[in-house]
Amino acid sequence: MTPENANKPQLTRETLMEIRRHARIQAIRKVSGYFLIALTFSRAVIPILGCIFVGLILFASDSTSSFHDFFLQYAQSKQSIFDLIADGVSLEIKLVFILLISLLFFVMEMIVIYLRKLIACFYEGNIFHHAAISYATKAFNWNLALTAVILALELCLSLMNMIYGTENPSLSMSTWIGNVVDEAIWIGCLLLIIWSLEIGVDLNEEAELTI
């Protein structure tokens, strides 16, 4: 060891780990700040978009078409559902779509609310914390409920596609099975993240007890 190095203070392993930990927390806080801005904006926009969609459905032209006629028209044409609604639907179909749209945007709003609370915990440095796990779990449960409803609706459309023989590829049973597999993989990844947070909390508590 040279005389210059001998006069320099030597960093211990614990000090180096603390420096790296502080750097990671600062990086997480910086990224979390951007996510907080995006989620705050999304929380304000989602109700506005929901009201716009409900208004478009409510003030669409009236017709006497039944659910059966509407489905056949949708399955056999290349138009979107909202284009068909704009062309004219019955009051019953309007009410069903208003209910579904309201439910969809409500669940999306709840997911964004809990995600924002989760990111706020990260921004404050409370990464492996019980509050973070609670918010992550609630956001996951709302997302799981939304996924289940969407897959159920897609299954109904696939069954109707088979019953009425419209042979629309986007409504086939194989497409629905593919969507189920995709969602199952995504849900599995989210569960791994939540379990990682839980393990981190346990390790932190064990470290505090050891100290």
Image (tube, grey):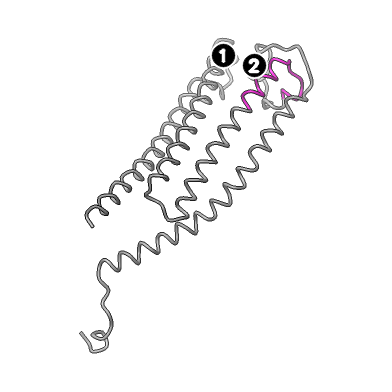
Horizontal side, residue 127 vs residue 5: left or right? right
Numbered-mark total: 2
Which kind of residue does numbered mark 1 sit on?
Answer: Met
Q: Earlier in the sequence, mark 1 or mark 2?
A: 2
Quarter of the picture holding the C terminus = bottom left
Residue 191, horizontal then vertical, whole percent:
38, 37
Residue 49, horizontal then vertical, whole percent:
67, 37
Q: Secondary structure at mark 1?
A: helix
Q: Which residue is mark 1?
A: 160
Q: Which residue is mark 2?
A: 71
Relative to the observer, which residue lies in front, 181 or 48?
48
Q: Residue at x 53, y 14 (%)?
A: 159
Residue 39, horizontal then vertical, whole percent:
57, 46
Q: Residue at x 66, y 20 (%)?
A: 74
Question: Magenta includes 86?
Answer: yes
Relative to the observer, which residue lies in front, 183 or 58?
58
Quarter of the image for residue 47 reads top right
Magenta residue span = 84-101
Contact (Cβ within 8 Å) of mark 1 with mark 2? yes
Which kind of residue does numbered mark 2 sit on?
Answer: Phe
Relative to the observer, which residue lies in front, 184 or 49?
49
Name the mark on residue 141: none
